[in-house]
Image (cartoon, rainbow, N blue to C red):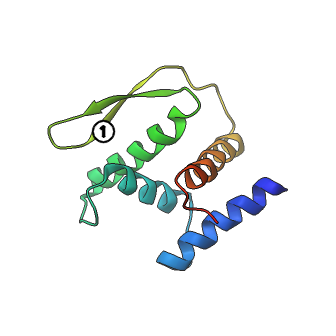
Amino acid sequence: MEFEKKWKEVVEIVEKRFGEGVDMQSLLFLIGVQELGHGPKKFTKDQKLDVIHVAVCTLLSRFGYYEFEGIDKDEWPHWKATNKLPYLKSSQQTQLMKQAIVEYFEENKLAR
């Protein structure tokens, strides 16, 4: 139950800043923007997917699935897969990402 409390706290923090209706996609997008460090800007549809990919790689790197390779000339980070992700049911994938998001917020002092 402690985990669910932390998850709700993260969602509440983000909703206070950005408004109601925060979901996993929006959290991943915000983390991706944070990791890019480009500040607020308009992204194309493809770039938005790339931003979410940055977040997923960042979050899953803490579990050893990705390794940071570096920044390209356009200042986008690149990752390489280091371990194959195990088969996970949808609910297990969601739980893994929630756990990673909570840890990200705690490590970056974004949670209470």
Q: Nearer the viewer, residue 56 or 40?
A: 40
Q: Tell me where residue 53 appears, x and y as whole percent.
A: 40, 43
Count the marks: how many?
A: 1
Q: Amino acid at mark 1?
A: Pro
Task: Report the front residue among 106 and 90.
Answer: 106
Q: Residue at 54%, 70% (x, y): give it.
A: 14
Question: How far across and how far down the image is residue 89, in percent?
Answer: 69, 37
Q: Is residue 12 visible?
A: yes
Q: Is residue 28 left or right of residue 7?
A: left
Residue 68 appears left or right of 97 = left
- Around disc 1, counting alpha carbons within 10 Å, would you say few (fewer than 14), some (14 to 19), or many (20 or more)? some
Is 23 drawn above or below residue 79 in the view shown?
below
Which corner quadrant of the image does residue 20 belong to?
bottom right
Tag 1 residue = 77
For residue 31, side relative to residue 16 (left or right): left
Q: Quadrant where the N terminus lies?
A: bottom right
Residue drawn at 16 percent across, 43 percent down:
74
The spot of residue 109 in percent (x, y) is 55, 58
Question: Which residue is pictured at 56% across the width and 75% down the height?
Answer: 15
Q: Quadrant for residue 78, please give it.
A: top left
